[in-house]
Structures are given as C-alpha cells and as structure tokens.
Amino acid sequence: MDDRQFRTAMGKFATGVTVIATEQDGDVHGMTANAFMSVSLDPKLVVISIGEHAKLLQKIKDSQIFTVNILAEDQKELSMIFAGQIKEPRHVEFGRLDGKPVLEGAVAQVACEVSAEHVEGDHTLFIGKVTDIRLEDKEPLVFYSGKYRSLEQEVSLV
Ligand code: FAD
C-alpha cells in the first residue's frame, strides 16, 4: 500500500469542511481541516487532528484554546484561504464566541478548551472541551474525493 492509495481511500469518506482557529497575543490563526469528530456528549468533547508541519500546531499548544467553524456552502473561498490554496494574503474578519475567534456565517461555530493532546504518528490529536456553540440555518460545504461539493438533495432512507 503506498501513500497515494491511502490518501485516495481516506478521501472516499465524505466530510464537511472546517476552519480551526486559535488566538495568541491578539493574533488569530486559522487552518482548514476535515479531520474533526464529535467524541462525547457528557462531557461535551470533540477531536481535531493537526499535522506535525502545520503552523497551527504550536499555536494551539501555546494558547490551549481553539474553535471549530463548520463552513457553509457559500464559504468555499474561506476554505481555500485557510488551506493556503489561495496564496495572496486576504483580510478575514473574525467574530467572537466565548471570547474565542470564530467565522461568522459558518453553519456551526464551536468554542473549545484543550482537555488533552495525543501525538499519533505525524499528527497530534487535540481533544476539545466544548465551552459554547452557535448555529446558523445554512447548508454545509462538503469535501469528497479531493473536491469541494454541496449537498444537492436529501437521500430518503425509507
Ligand atoms: P499556513 O499554511 O501558513 O496558513 C494557511 C493559510 O491561512 C495561509 O494562506 C494564511 O495566510 C491563512 N491565514 C491564517 N490565519 C489567517 C488570518 N487570521 N487571516 C487571514 N488569513 C489567515 N491539515 C491538517 O493538519 N489536518 C486536517 O484535518 C486537514 N484537513 C484538510 C482538509 C481540506 C479540505 C484541505 C483543503 C486541507 C486540509 N489540511 C489539513 C491541510 C491544511 O489546511 C494546510 O496544510 C494548511 O496550509 C496548513 O496551515 P498552517 O497552520 O501550516 O498555516
């Protein structure tokens, strides 16, 4: 099994797209991520997975806080900005939730405090204790097989 085959297989898992944001000494840093999962209801915990070369890694280690912003279908450009797919620097305005930086217009904005971190291979998993949530009634941006997509129709299960 080579790296390409592993990536292709993992890309067959359709996900939403998030921007993880943190703040240190007034500087907000965001990064696009789809390795995000709900972990526990009581207490309310989520997990994110950050690559060892990502600048965001040390910033979260230092700040011990992050937000998960689940992007709406009209926010593809934000995903591209925070993934470094748009190279020119852009000014992005952040709002606040529980004092932490969030992207307004995201379908869900989740504020977290780091409750644990685990290094696994070339990534670090951060477990976040959820301190606040804001929801917006919009459709999500979807990522599948290396491409951005939108939900076109609901699939009936019956
Ligand atoms: P940089 O590459 O320096 O930052 C990313 C970009 O964000 C830069 O262009 C920077 O200018 C911009 N930026 C940061 N903060 C601000 C701000 N305040 N205002 C304006 N612009 C700002 N990587 C993972 O580790 N885990 C994942 O789960 C993951 N999932 C991904 C899912 C998708 C769909 C995509 C496209 C990429 C994913 N990546 C993931 C890769 C990751 O997004 C990129 O490698 C990213 O460039 C790493 O960011 P960085 O923290 O190293 O910082």
Image (spheres, rainbow, N blue to C red):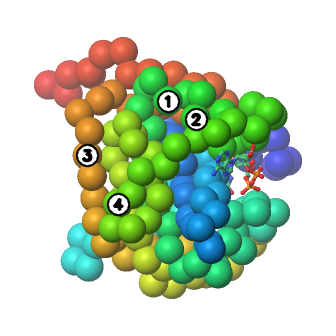
Residue shown at 76% from the left, 38% from the top: 89
Give residue 96's quadrant in the image: bottom left
Residue shown at 66% from the left, 43% from the top: 82
Residue 139: image location, x then y, percent: 33, 28
Label 4 to label 3, Cα distance in Å?
Answer: 11 Å
Q: Nearer the viewer, residue 123 or 6?
A: 123
Q: Earlier in the sequence, mark 3 or mark 2?
A: 2
Q: Earlier in the sequence, mark 3 or mark 1?
A: 1
Name the mark nearer the viewer: 4 or 1: 4
Mark 4, other Cα within 10 Å: few <14 / some 14–19 / many ≥20: some
Mark 1, other Cα within 10 Å: few <14 / some 14–19 / many ≥20: some
In the rendered structure, which amino acid carries the disc numbered 2?
Leu
Q: Earlier in the sequence, mark 4 or mark 1?
A: 1
Q: Which residue in the protein does label 3 denote?
A: 135
Label 4 to label 2, Cα distance in Å?
Answer: 19 Å
Give residue 11's quadrant in the image: top right
Q: Which residue in the protein does label 4 denote?
A: 97
Look at the numbered discs 2 and 1 and tell me whether their residues touch, using CB distance below 8 Å: yes
Give residue 146's quadrant in the image: top right
Mark 3, other Cα within 10 Å: few <14 / some 14–19 / many ≥20: some
Eyeballing the image, is 119 above or below 105? Answer: below
Q: Nearer the viewer, residue 97 or 1?
A: 97
Q: Nearer the viewer, residue 140 or 82?
A: 82
Residue 137: image location, x then y, percent: 23, 33
Q: Which residue in the protein does label 1 denote?
A: 75
In the rendered structure, which amino acid carries the disc numbered 3?
Leu
Eyeballing the image, is 101 above or below 140? Answer: below
In the rendered structure, which amino acid carries the disc numbered 1?
Gln
Q: Which residue in the protein does label 2 denote?
A: 78
